[in-house]
Amino acid sequence: MALTRTALLNALKSFTPDVGAAVRRFPLASLIAVVFTLLHLFEAKDVFGLSGNAWMRVSLGLGTAFLWSMALTLYAERHEWSRVRRLAGEVAGFGVVAMLFTQSVLFSLQPHLMFLAAGILVGLAAYMRVGSTPNAAFWQFNHHLWLGAGLSLVGALLFAGGLSLIVETLELLFEVDFPRTTHEKIWTVAFGLVAPINWLSLTPTDFSETVQEGEQEEFTSRAVAVIVKYILAPLLLVYTAILYAYAVKIAIDGMLPKGRLGPMVLAYGALMTLTVLLAWPARTASGPLVTIFWRHWFWLILGPVALLFLAVYQRIAQYGVTDERYMVVLAGVWLAVLGLWFLFRRGVRDLRILPASLAIALFLAAFGPWGAVGLSVRSQTAQLAGLLEKHGRMKDGQVVNTDADKPLPRAEGRRVASILRYLERSGHLYELEGWFAAMEKSPFRPGASTARISKDILLRVGAPQGAHILTEAEHLNFTAARPISLAASRLDRIIGPLALKHGSTDTVLAVEGGGVLSVDFENNVVTVRFEDGRELQFDLVATARKALTLKAPRKPTDQQDDPRVPLRIAASDANEKSLLLVENMWGNISDEIVEVRLLRGWLLIRKD
């Protein structure tokens, strides 16, 4: 008897009941997971010619849309929205996400923060009604939700690890030749499709189930209570005592706290708030340490937050605001507000305040002139203007021509390069275009890449050569894998091994039999000068681009299969007789610029 459509659907459900239920419940989120996986499997980055930053934004944008779809579905289920209304809400959210992520420079978007805010929203979506305090139901739902996320990641890891092991075994035992990208595609499917769909299938459907307060009997809740009681609460109380002792020490010494304290306090604050959430069900039945922690955490955290502000103040005063310092200050403000809120809050304390306030803070920091990128760009631009004015490179808002014989001090040059690198990476380099309007040849010429513009700006303001590191570039790390044979009948001398760093000048080498020669390495050119006035130059640009394309074979059957032999660079003299033989080369390469920073090799000087 022919199978009907209903029979086929029922058969599919019997084989994949959880996956089918997840797709029916979260259709658009499932579709996004499929699209994400297909784009990575078919290497859409190369197909569409996307840069690394653009590809990152596409990936995070899809991830943010997935989380938004998931959150809105949970909210709609709890409030019994119609399917049409829910679909309209999801599509509207997708439109906002697409606008922000495709116009990231215009909105000064920080994609990671938007992604994190959307992730927190998933756990809050079903409990956003103001006025109620559903701590028990909120805790239980999130316990199941994030436990399901963790199990989904473990399942994806086992899936990918098992398939990769099968592939390696087939290659070893049966000499089956799989493509080079097989393992990459396996892991892409595992974490792009298998893990998200499994998480959707494990997402709770009961929003009213509550956790038992007091002694925990359910296995996973009891495990959480044990971790809080014997590990998290004692360690945090000890760490709190250390931070307060350090506060007393700096008060006695009359000195500011160390700059490295910021990340330490951030980690402490994050773990503190997570422990507060985890400790809630068993807070009255986990012993005296947990009781002390629960009752006093909100004012204990205020002292370390004050240390954090003191630690970051000096760095901002000296070097301005950056994304990282912005986040340190934001976290400090968030922790301080939380501590004060719970300190003066009477009655039952609402657990939702912790994740909700964090989600709002991350969302506000993710875009706009007030956000991490917008504020940091303005601060760093002002820092750059101050540096240039200090050294006479800028006047009345315009960069002026400088004397090439008076370069910026090395430390100042590197600071200028660091700011330019940040503006280039964040997509805001063109905000400096007006500074060069009065110049006859502006660095912002049509068709120039941002890497080329940054390099030209450094040259115009007199920064030391080699101060700039390319942002949109591939990393070059060439190492010869097998020897090379060269005819040596007309060699005058072999000099090496040479280990040269970009920017090194007048490296003096003694020559056996008497005499010396000097070697300079600047601007991708190795220059060798002899005592008699002769000079040889070796240009590394073409060879560096060639080295970038040389890859080790996946399964070499013979040493000769490896194309990475030492690279030969002929001298640029008329006869091109002498050679620089390169064994190792390290640097960065973009479409327009090559920067070789380190090399190791031998000089082969031939007779005239």
Image (spheres, rainbow, N blue to C red):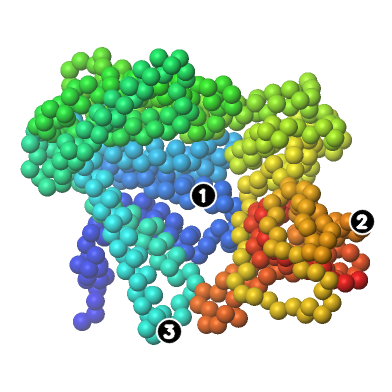
Residue pointed to by mark 3? 175
Hey, what amino acid is under mark 2?
Gly
Left or right of 252? Residue 282 is left
In percent of width and height, residue 12 lies at 25, 68
Hey, what amino acid is under mark 3?
Glu
Residue pointed to by mark 1? 56
Residue at 88% x, 72% y: name it: 607
Which secondary structure, mark 3?
loop
Residue at 51% x, 49% y: name it: 56
Left or right of 234? Residue 533 is right
Quadrant in which the N terminus is drawn: bottom left
Nearest to the eye among marks 2 and 1: give it: 2
Residue pointed to by mark 2? 533
Left or right of 83? Residue 186 is right
Q: Can residue 141 be seen in this view?
A: no
Left or right of 340? Residue 452 is right
- Residues at marks 2 and 1 touching, judged by CB atoms closer than 8 Å: no
Q: Nearer the viewer, residue 413 or 566?
A: 566
In percent of width and height, residue 581 lies at 73, 67
Nearest to the eye among marks 3 and 1: give it: 3
Which secondary structure, mark 1?
helix
Instruction: For marks 2 and 1, give the CA distance.
Output: 52 Å
Instruction: For marks 3 and 2, give the CA distance.
Output: 60 Å
